[in-house]
Amino acid sequence: MNEVKLNTIRALIGEATPKIGRFEAMILLAHILGKPKEYLIAHDDEELPDTTLMTFDVYVSMRLDGVPVAYLTGRQEFFGRYFTVDHNVLIPRPDTEVLIEQALIVAPEKPEILDMGTGSGCIAVTLAKECPGARVTATDVSEEALAIARGNAETLGAEVEFRKGSWWEAVPEGARYDLIVSNPPYIPTGDIEGLDHSVKDYEPHMALDGGADGLDFYRFIAAKWKNAIRLGGSLIFEVGIGQAPDVENILAQNGFEQIQTTADTQGIWRVVEGTING
């Protein structure tokens, strides 16, 4: 009878799968080995040293404690590129790719774009890469987040101007943009404690808390920064589940026209946009 080996790639993935799922187990082991996930499949009978087994056990334990996989590996894929992340920034999510797609549809030739509350820089960097000739400015109040975003822009070869400042004062008076985009904090304050453990205990609260009803930043940005949008330009928001009608109303009340909402791949109304026509 052949001896069952417990130190192979196959064995480690098999042991971890009931705990954290096969997909996450493969991501973590591939990260530890410095190999793509495809390598694990092609070499699943490879025996691993004890040090790798111990490291993998630590990662699985941390994941079971709620630490997001992206914070364990230090990176997350977004729009076909990998972005560095840590606990100072929200983890980029596929939902936000809808915002990118809509921005690319409405952006004029060589647009000037402002990304408010950039976090990891995933929106700003992606637009700079995907929109030829774009001049992109990105803001955040967190110097730690900006350091992550600047690093991502440099690594991915994107030209983005990063500015430190709050939602109130991040850009110079009189600046004008063809497009303002934002994925602002939109979780109602009272709902944060009910979020999944991996979100509420690890992702930055300042990037989650949208005030009593979750709409504070939509109201503020739509009112204060509408005059920073050129005629014919657009403001595009990512919104939380069920918030689209309220954000549509906020845009309408502030003089935006051609307001439309786009659903994500799950059928959730995820992006709301409006245009300034005069």
Image (spheres, rainbow, N blue to C red):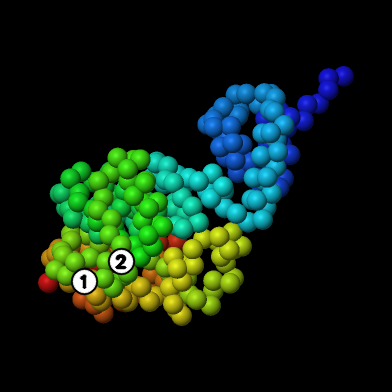
Residue 266 makes an appearance in the image: no
Residue 82, located in which quarter of the rendered image? top left
Question: Which image quadrant for residue 56?
Answer: top right
Q: Position of residue 213 (x, y in %)?
A: 45, 78
Q: Is residue 34 visible?
A: yes
Q: Vertical placement of 12 versus 207: above or below?
A: above
* 64 relative to 277 in the view: left or right: right
Task: Give neighbour class at mark 1: few <14, some 14-19, many 20+ (Cα, 10 Å).
Answer: many
Q: Nearer the viewer, residue 265 or 26?
A: 26
Q: Which mark is residue 155?
A: none
12 relative to 125, above or below = above
Local packing at callout 2 (Cα closer than 10 Å; few below 14, some 14-19, many 20+) is some
Residue with the most extreme top position: 1
Secondary structure beneath label 2: loop
Measuring 59% from the left and 70% from the top, which residue is drawn there?
Answer: 194
Q: Toward the viewer: 171 or 130? A: 171
Q: Residue at x 32, y 46 (%)?
A: 153
Label 1 vs 2, first from the N-terminus: 2
Residue at the (37%, 60%) spot, across then down: 143
Mark 1: which amino acid?
Lys
Relative image position of residue 79 (x, y in whole percent):
38, 45
Residue 218: % across, % down: 34, 72
At mark 1, the secondary structure is helix
Residue occupied by mark 1 = 226
Please, what is the three-letter code of the amino acid marked with disc 2? Answer: Gly
49 vs 237, nearest the viewer = 49
Indicate whether 38 appears above or below 188: above
Q: Tell me the residue at 31%/48% (across/down).
A: 125
